[in-house]
Image (cartoon, grey):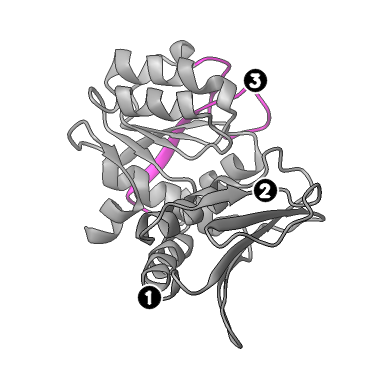
């Protein structure tokens, strides 16, 4: 049984993670971390250092501001961590890499298995089409999402970029420009509205044809399932930075 310490337990994703664990017999949430106690069926602490129990792994769906304290706790207690919080800075991602030298860290811009498959397919498509096709990425999320573009859109762009012979630039805003689209760029566009859970579309636009790859999440459960699978996978592993490719290979 994998005991999970759930950071951000009162948020929408935290609640989705807990609900998903109820359907499994190989893991459970033993405590939560959040700024308020809420109405959770387990003890909730404002700081991980207030928790005096033993967890096998941390799942973090909280806020980027909480990351440093959470990693400090992970190091002190030698507890593996699944970091699923979005909107991390480059410095914070580097901090994850440094921490992973001492404790196992699982990090992905998106916890959905389907999105990570989309990333693999986009990489293959870029190798075949990239030299002769213009590439655009469109992502859509609910109106409460704080960061734009999404981390997933950047992840997809990075996968495509790595497959191209010449590294492209990322274009987020064309409205101030009056010029033809340069060949060597990837346009990334964000939509925010309603309760859209998460949609990503990659467009390869060539001469007289358009190829599209897309993924649409119907609920937060797909991300919760991915995070829990990652937690069960990483518990007891050696220190390293893990991602969805490692989980899929298992």
Are the two marked residues, 1 and 3, in contact with CB atoms closer than 8 angstroms? no
Tell me the quarter of the picture where residue 161 sits.
bottom left
Which numbered disc flags the more N-terminal residue, 3 or 2?
A: 3
Q: Real-space Cα distance between discs 3 and 2?
A: 34 Å
In terms of depth relative to the viewer, which is nearer, 198 or 46?
198
- Residue lying at the far left in this picture: please name it: 238
Residue in view at x 35 percent, y 60 percent: 165
Residue in view at x 47 percent, y 17 percent: 68
Magenta run includes residue 37: yes
Is most of the magenta stretch helix, strand or loop?
A: loop
Give the label, 1 or 3, closer to the camera: 1
Which residue in the structure is indicated by mark 2?
Answer: 172
Image x and y of residue 125, in percent = 42, 73
Local crowd size for mark 1, using a 10 Å CA cut-off: few (<14), some (14–19), many (≥20): few
Q: Secondary structure at mark 1?
A: helix
Q: Judge whether 249 appears above or below 47 on screen.
A: below
Q: Secondary structure at mark 3?
A: loop
Q: Real-space Cα distance between discs 2 and 1?
A: 24 Å
Q: Judge whether 247 appears above or below 208 on screen.
A: above
Residue 161 as seen in the image, left or right of residue 191: left
Which residue in the structure is indicated by mark 3?
Answer: 35
Magenta span: 25-47
């Amino acid at each position: 049984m994998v005991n999970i310490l759930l950071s951000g337990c009162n948020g929408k994703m935290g609640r989705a993670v807990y609900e998903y664990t109820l359907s499994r017999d190989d893991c459970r949430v033993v405590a939560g971390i959040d700024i308020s106690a809420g109405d959770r069926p387990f003890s909730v602490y404002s700081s991980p250092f207030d928790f005096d129990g033993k967890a096998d792994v941390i799942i973090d769906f909280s806020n980027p501001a909480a990351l440093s304290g959470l990693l400090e706790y992970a190091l002190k207690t030698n507890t593996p961590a699944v970091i699923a919080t979005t909107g991390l800075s480059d410095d914070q991602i580097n901090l994850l890499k440094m921490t992973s030298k001492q404790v196992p860290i699982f990090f992905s811009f998106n916890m959905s298995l389907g999105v990570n498959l989309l990333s693999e397919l986009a990489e293959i498509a870029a190798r075949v089409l990239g030299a002769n096709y213009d590439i655009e990425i469109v992502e859509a999320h609910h109106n409460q999402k704080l960061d734009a573009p999404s981390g997933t859109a950047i992840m997809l762009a990075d996968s495509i970029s790595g497959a191209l012979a010449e590294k492209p630039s990322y274009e987020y805003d064309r409205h101030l420009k009056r010029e033809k689209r340069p060949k060597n760029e990837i346009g990334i566009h964000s939509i925010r509205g309603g309760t859209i859970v998460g949609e990503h579309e990659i467009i390869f636009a060539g001469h007289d044809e358009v190829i599209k790859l897309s993924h649409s999440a119907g609920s937060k459960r797909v991300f919760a399932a991915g995070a829990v699978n990652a937690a069960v996978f990483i518990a007891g592993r050696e220190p390293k930075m893990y991602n969805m490719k490692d989980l899929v290979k298992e």
